[in-house]
Amino acid sequence: MADWMFYMKKNKEKEAVKAKEREEKEKLKDVLITGTAETEIRKAQFEREKNWAATGRETKSNLKDVLITGTAETEIRKAQFDREKNWAATGRETKSSLKDVNMATAVIETEIRKEQHKREQEWKQTSRETIKKNEDVNMAKAAFG
């Protein structure tokens, strides 16, 4: 029975909360919110944007008949573009002129390096053979023998 009473009490509390909410809604129904600081800020921002866009449109319409022949920036960009074009052309010409050069031909430096490598390999091989030959030698016997 105690559980039943508990649930009845909870239901009454819920109903009271809902009734209070309904009352608050009724009170606030007729309230007119005129403006907040945030609304005013947004309005000012909107006006600024509108004026900025209008200025842009006006400037465009005013400059419609102006003929721009060349500016310093245009000349600089043109010079840079021409430099790049010439650089690329030079690269292409160099590639085409070096197409027939055979880089596989022996060069003196390559021959010297090959010789040095061969000498080094022979020295290592001699060292290996000497070690292998001296495996049977007992140094203790040879020294105190």
Image (spheres, rainbow, N blue to C red):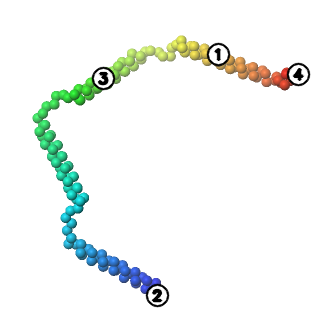
User: Residue type at mark 4?
Assistant: Gly
Q: Which residue is mark 1?
A: 119
Point out the tag, 4 or 2, that comes first from the N-terminus: 2
Residue at x-position 20% and y-position 62%: 35
Q: Counting other residues with Cα less than 10 Å from the Cα at mark 3, is it few (<14), some (14-19), or many (20 or more)? A: few
Label 3: which residue? 83
Residue 105 is left or right of residue 68, and the answer is right
Tell me the number on the disc at residue 1: 2
Q: Residues within 10 Å of mark 2 (few under 14, many from 20)?
A: few
The three-letter code of the residue at mark 3 reads Arg
Residue ID at (30%, 23%): 83
Name the residue at the right extreme. Answer: 145
Distance of mark 3 from mark 4, alpha carbons?
85 Å
SS of the residue under disc 1: helix
In front: 18, or 48?
Answer: 48
CB contact under 8 Å: marks 2 and 3: no
Q: Are marks 4 and 2 in contact (CB under 8 Å)?
A: no
Q: Is residue 76 above or below residue 18?
A: above
* Badge count: 4
